Image: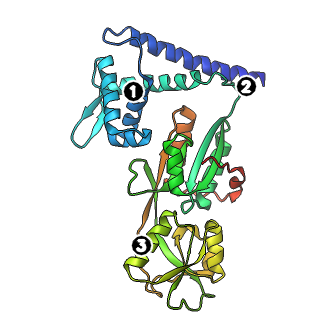
Amino acid sequence: MLCINLFSIFNKLKIMLQFVNVILEMMNSDTMALYLDIHAVEAFVKVAELNSFTLAAESLCVTQSGVTVKVQRLEKHLGCSLFHRTPRHVYLSPEGKEFLFKARVLLEAHRQAINPYFECNELKELTICIGEHVINENILDILNNLKNEFKSLRVNINVNMSEKILYCLENKKIDIAIVSQDGDKRGGETVRKDTYSWYASELLFETGPALPLITLHDSCRLCQLVIELLTEHHVKWYHSFQGGGLHAMITAAKSGLGVVPLPDNALSPEDRQVLKNVGDTLNLPCIPDANIVIYNNCLDQQSRLFLKKLTQLIQNNVFSGINSQVLENTLNVC
């Protein structure tokens, strides 16, 4: 334990020395003011990572003009342009590339400095929220493997409505959000595209004059979408089962209670033996595909590395075969 603490202390001292060197270099600049606005530095790093002032503003939950002013103020302090700007593209200048490393060191040192109760052996909390229609065994397997790899992080997982997750993200209550892309929310990184179909069991012999519909709840984005589609195509419907989560919806459909709209990757091989795609049979409208997007509030190096690997693994559709026991560590934070 003593060796672990000494190693942690050494790493903290190393970061602080890097921070001191960065400050000394900045103070030696004739055009540099003595103090830097940490929010301006954070805005610069976000723009550099996303190559967009608009996406950086969305990620930081501020206006685009606010990000632009902060970066311009930072450039004035440094006495150089950090970005090359064209009508369509934003990319780092040579000075910007050089400053990016210093900016990240500064942000990490700032993160540790503002926590007076930081302990060397304390695990960092990383809270991940996943949309109810987005979560599947593949994502859980990936998260479980990453939890075992990143021992310095305590990963907490919450499954919730996309609307509530985005609210928590904007209010800095969570670190990573994995949700279906909303038409009003830009930014983030697309990790997969989900296709949707209408599923029902053979136990549902006939639907009658109105379609028995199985959905989550009225505030669910998919529920609102399918109701709009059914109304637009003049399909009569009623709620035969509502709420309870994805597993409850699938169970209700397998019992013959109605027709359920689902992502095609949400069903296990066992589910597919019972539930069949009935969209064409019942002449139901096609459900549009949805992009699954990752948003984040990650600032420290470990969380960013976790985020990078998580994004790559979902994009590559890596399946590890571990069961879904990772949900046992779920923590509601929203």
The residue type indicated by label 3 comes to Glu
**Residue 26 seen by the camera:** yes
Residue at 69% over, 25% down:
119
Q: Position of residue 61 (x, y in %)?
A: 43, 40
Q: Quadrant of residue 309?
A: top right
Relative side of 255 to 312, left or right: right
Relative side of 75 to 42, left or right: left
Residue named by callout 3: 228
**Foreground: disc 1 or disc 2:** 1
Residue at disc 1, secondary structure: helix
Q: CA distance from mark 1 to mark 2?
A: 35 Å
| Up/down of 34 relative to 315, above or below | above
Q: CA distance from mark 3 to mark 1?
A: 43 Å
In terms of sequence position, does the residue under pointer 3 or pointer 1 come before the other? 1
The residue type indicated by label 2 comes to Ile
Residue at disc 2, secondary structure: helix
Q: Quadrant of the N terminus?
A: top right
The tag on residue 40 is 1
Residue at 62% over, 65% down:
245
Q: Quadrant of residue 265?
A: bottom right
Q: Position of residue 282 (x, y in %)?
A: 47, 87
The tag on residue 4 is 2
